[in-house]
Structure formats: C-alpha cells, structure tokens
Image (cartoon, rainbow, N blue to C red):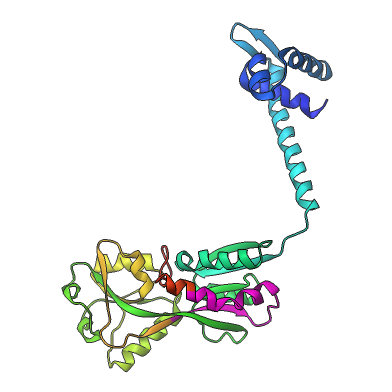
Amino acid sequence: MELRHLRYFVAVAEEGSLTLAAEKRLHTAQPSLSRQIRDLEYEVGVQLMSRSVHGIELTAAGRAFLDHARLALTQADAAGEAARRAAQPAKPTFALGFLTGQEMDWLPETMRILQNELPNIEVSVSSQYSPDLAQALLRGKLDLAFMRPEAHMPDLDYKVVVKEPLIVAMPSDHRLASHDTVALQEIAGEIFIGMSNTAPTLQVIIDEYLERSGMDLRPAHRVDNLAMAMSLIASTRGVALLPIYAKNFLPWSVTSRPLRGKAPTIDLVIGYHKANTSPILRTFLSRIDDLTARISSKGRGTGGPAAAP
C-alpha cells in the first residue's frame, strides 16, 4: 500500500465520484484511477466503495478506512515538513518586548531596521507591563524591550527613545474640557485616578510632580492599564494624569488637555541586559538614532492599541 493509493481513495470519497476526483483533484484518467482503487481494495482485502445511482458510496469498511487514511496522509505531510525544517540551518532569534500599546509606533520601524540589517533572523514579539518586561530581560526571555526605566534593576541598561509629557484626561463634558490647558490646581477636589503597581515608574513621576506643586491628590481608584483608566474616567467622572500616548485610546466619552506650565515627562526607553552579548542586539543598538529620528519625523512615538500606562 502506497501513499498515492490513500490520496486517490480520499479524493474519490470526498468528491463522491471517480470522474470528478480524476478530473478536478488528481488530474489523471478515470480508468487509471479506477484501477488504483481496485488495487487498494485488493491490498486491504475488503470492498471500500460501491457504485449507486448517487455516484460512489463508501461501504462500512470504507468509512472506517477513510479516517485512518486521512490521518496517515496528515502524518506523512507533517513528517516531510519536519524533515525539511531539520535540513535547514537554524536561524538566529531575537526576542522583542513592548510596553503594551507602544507597538503601533515602534514595531514597524524596529522591524524595518532588523530586516534591513539582519534579514535572516527570526523575531518574536510580545507585549506586557513594564515591570514584567524587566523581569523577562533579567531571565533572558527577551533580548530588548521598549519599556519604562524600572528602578532597582542594576543588571539592565536603558537608552531613552522619547520623553512623553503627561496630560490631564477627563470626561468629554467636564467643566475643564472648555479650557485649552489645565492647571494642576484646577483638578483639586476632583475624583483622582492613580496607577496601580503595574506602572510604578509613572506613579513615582506623578507623586513627585504633585509634591513639587504642593498638591495632595489622593487616588480614589487605581488602574492597571489605559482601557481601565478610560472606563473609570467615564464612569466615575474622575480625572487622571497619563502619558500623552494615551490620547490614541480616548473614546468619545473621554477627552484630554495639556497641563499648564512645564508638564512632567516620563521616559520610554529601550532596555536590555548588560550581559547580553547577542550581535543582533549590538547591531540594533547602533541604529537607535536612526529609529528615533524616523519616528520623530512622522510626528509619532506616543501611541498604540489598549495599553498599559
């Protein structure tokens, strides 16, 4: 019994006709196909198909044989693919991580650089909260991450790619929405929405800004990500201080305004393990200036999909 016998049998069973299977699927002559089916039945020792007014019908034995024939063909195809992969030299891999939401701006240009400089590598991409990205770098699960500069990580190096000013996010019909800019003092007394421990760097920047401004705004709620922030702003009519790339996720019910005066900024950095000796990493790091220049020229670098702050 050969694989071609199984392919012929499956084709006839699925088409319900020797003629259709021969012409449409197998591109062979119908008498030759009939002979191959008879050879298969002789090999198996039972009748697998019968002719009727409706065309070819499977016998009980044929129906049982069909499932196994399909499985055998699938396994044969998989075996061939595995052999072809094994025969090819393994490609070097590079694992990229992104603070969730930053992929939209930074991934296309990152991939352009990698494909231009190193076309024969495999790139994996994941998105997580910034503290999780830091841990993945430390464990060697990632080679490079677009993230926040997490504190107390002496084994990581950071290179700043953009400084994002903070903005005030509020309900679209909020009393301050008619202002061009909003002074921090104007949100005193409002329901204030802060960050959870998924964004510790951002929360530190907000706390320091409030302290410098002599403001004591205690969060009524804390959020894990921008989607949750938008939901709470709309539902509680609260306000939040968020990085400017949050503007990309504003629903109709939420708007934003710049802070009046000098707004605090939060760094988006490229992070990597100091001990990582990957030549791919070194090549990419040598092109960071090109990356940031191209993003800046497009007026981007502050956006992305449902994101972590």
Is the residue 249 above or below the residue 75 in the image?
below
In the depicted view, which residue is nearer to us: 77 or 114? 114
Residue 180 seen in this snapshot: yes
Residue 65 seen in this snapshot: no
Q: Is residue 268 magenta?
A: yes
Number of dots carrying numbers: 0
195 displayed left or right of 107: left
Q: Is residue 125 magenta?
A: no
In the depicted view, which residue is nearer to us: 131 or 262? 262
52 displayed left or right of 264: right
Give the residues drawn in magenta, as a range.
Answer: 267-293
- Quadrant location of the C terminus in the rendered image: bottom left
Q: Position of residue 276 (x, y in %)?
A: 68, 78
In the depicted view, which residue is nearer to us: 162 or 293? 293
Quarter of the rendering containing residue 67: top right
Quarter of the rendering containing residue 28: top right
In the depicted view, which residue is nearer to us: 198 or 105? 105
- Quadrant location of the N terminus in the rendered image: top right
189 displayed left or right of 105: left
Is the residue 24 above or below the residue 87 in the image?
above
- For image coordinates 34% across by 77% down, the residue present is 194
Quarter of the rendering containing residue 114: bottom right
Q: Name the residue furthest top.
A: 53
Q: Position of residue 277 (x, y in %)?
A: 71, 78
Q: Position of residue 45 (x, y in %)?
A: 82, 16
Q: Position of residue 111 (x, y in %)?
A: 57, 64
- For image coordinates 68% across by 81% down, the residue present is 275
